[in-house]
Image (tube, rainbow, N blue to C red):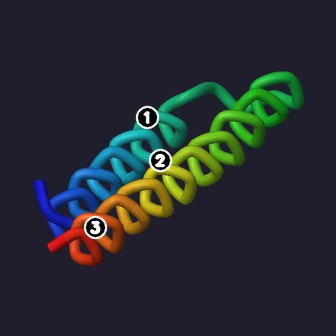
Amino acid sequence: MDKVQLQNRTKNFALRVFRMVEKLPKSKGVEVIIFQLLENLLKEANELVAIFTAAIKTSKNDS
């Protein structure tokens, strides 16, 4: 999997999560859970992209 494929998979996953969140009932408790879910989703996606980018740079330097 290359960087573009990873970005597309991450984007599609995030979009599926957003669509799921839109279907949840509206209440204060659910809003808190949604906020935490989305916050963690973005954090994990950024970490994954950073790890993948570092791996690509390392493999290019080894060549």
Q: Is residue 30 left or right of residue 44?
A: right
Which residue sits at x=64%, y=50%? 43
Q: Which residue is mark 3?
A: 56
- Gap in angstroms between the C-alphas marked 1 and 3: 32 Å
Q: Is residue 10 above or below residue 33?
A: below
Image x and y of residue 31, in percent: 78, 35
Among the 4 quarters of the image, the one containing residue 7 = bottom left
Left or right: 43 in relation to 7: right
The residue that appears at 44% across and 40% down in the rendered structure is 17
Q: Earlier in the sequence, mark 2 or mark 3?
A: 2
Cβ–Cβ below 8 Å for labels 1 and 2?
Answer: yes
Task: Look at discs 2 and 3 and give the one toward the viewer.
Answer: 3
Residue topped by disc 2:
18
Q: Are marks 1 and 3 in contact (CB under 8 Å)?
A: no
Q: Name the residue that disc number 1 marks.
A: 20
Of the residues tagged 1 and 3, which is closer to the observer? 3
Q: CA distance from mark 2 to mark 3?
A: 29 Å
Q: Nearer the viewer, residue 39 or 57?
A: 57
Quarter holding the C terminus?
Answer: bottom left
Residue 6 position, x and y percent, is 24, 57
Image coordinates for residue 45, horizontal then vertical, percent: 49, 52
